[in-house]
Image (spheres, rainbow, N blue to C red):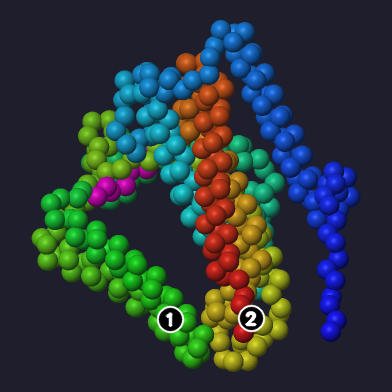
Amino acid sequence: MSMTATPPQESFRVDMLWNDARYRSTFIQTIALMLVMLAVAWLASNAVRNLEALGKDFNFSFLWQPASYDINQRLIEYDSRDSNARAALLGILNTLLVAAMGIVTATVIGVVAGVLRLSKNWIVSRLMAVYVEAFRNVPLLIWILMIAAAVNETLPAPSAFRGVETGAFVATNRGLYVPAPIFGEGSTPIVAIFLASLAGLFLLRRWAAKRQAETGEQFPVFWAGLALLVAPATLAFLALGRPIDLELPELAGFNFRGGFFLRDSLVAMWLALSLYTGAFIAETVRAGILAVSHGQSEAAYALGLRPNRAMSLVVLPQALRVIVPPLISQYLNLTKNSSLAIAVGYMDATGTLGGITLNQTGREMECILLLMAFYLTVSLLISGVMNWYNTRVKLVER
């Protein structure tokens, strides 16, 4: 009968923290974390001492003091007697508005321009090349100022529409007027049905993609989805007596009243951010398409697919794995570049919290920290959503 002797375990020694691979990594990371925490503590202590030397303290009570200034673009009710916190909230909403509009528009422009740059039509491809190179090589601030000047100087004044049938959308040198929905009694079920239709559309797309992957048969998702999105809400709208109406802009005096007003500064920022970021997205899309082997397109054509179907079904799905990661950076850049809005008088988070509120209260440390926290939070949310989408579109091996 044989017995296997267990080797004696070596007792722990201090020098094992940097000599033993089992402990070295954790030890170095712990030391690095402690050094970072000490540096942050020293900076915070130094800032507090400097504030005390200036007769200041560190608190956020200024947020509840009256703002005492007006904001030109409003998504919520606000007047100058409201608090600095509400003014900051309105600036944050204005930032999110121009960022969301810019991301959607820049994506559409970038995808279209990126595909057209690869067009076999020489004129189309050269025009897209001129657009991309012009916007990529001129600073964004200059484009913002140029587009703001174009909006103010080329569009007519509201008085030019006197006696003229304007319709639902009106573009003036003061801004863009669009219809605003008016939700009457009984509109809640219609909104709920529309949201349910959106969820149904998402499930339909997933089912159609799974069905196509298993059987190779395509389902008319566009027309079925359009019917699912429009028909239930329209039937409920008619059955409930049309409880939702549209408020159209109408000329009253020297300006338009009614509808939703997008100021000239917002329109300029929206167009500038969209066109500028769209040029970078176009190059990303072009690079992603070129990264897909040309044999994939030839195989699609051999199967009888037309060029547009081959692009949407074969090339773009494979190109997304190259396109999405740099696309995240472009979305983040667009959101942070919206802080240039103060150049044209658009009151975003930088203009309210980091501008007028900071100057009036003298709380530069608190305002800058809040502004940094806002942009950091938005950037992390965008990164999280886009990374989740990137995981969903990655190629999965059978």
In the rendered image of this protein, does residue 350 appear above or below residue 356? Answer: below
Which amino acid type corresponds to the residue marked 2 in the rendered image? Glu
Q: Residue at x 83, y 68 (%)?
A: 6
Q: Residue at x 52, y 85 (%)?
A: 213
Tell me whether the residue at label 2 lies in contact with that at label 1, contact meaning CB atoms closer than 8 angstroms: no
| Residue at mark 1 | 208
Q: What percent of the width, then of the height, locates residue 375?
A: 54, 39
Q: What percent of the width, then of the height, locates residue 209?
A: 47, 80
Q: Is residue 322 a member of the stretch shown in magenta?
A: no
Q: Quadrant of residue 162?
A: top left
* Foreground disc of the pair 2, 1: 2
Which residue range is magenta in the image? 174-181
Which amino acid type corresponds to the residue marked 1 in the rendered image? Ala
Q: What percent of the width, then of the height, locates residue 190?
A: 21, 61
Dot 1 falls on a residue whose secondary structure is helix
How many other residues sit within 10 Å of disc 2, few (<14), some (14-19) or many (≥20)? few
Q: Earlier in the sequence, mark 2 or mark 1?
A: 1
Nearer-the-camera pick, 100 or 160: 100
Q: Residue at x 43, y 20 (%)?
A: 61
Nearer-the-camera pick, 154 or 247: 247
In the rendered image of this protein, does residue 302 appear above or below residue 13? Answer: below
| Residue at mark 2 | 397
For the stretch drawn in magenta, the main secondary structure is strand
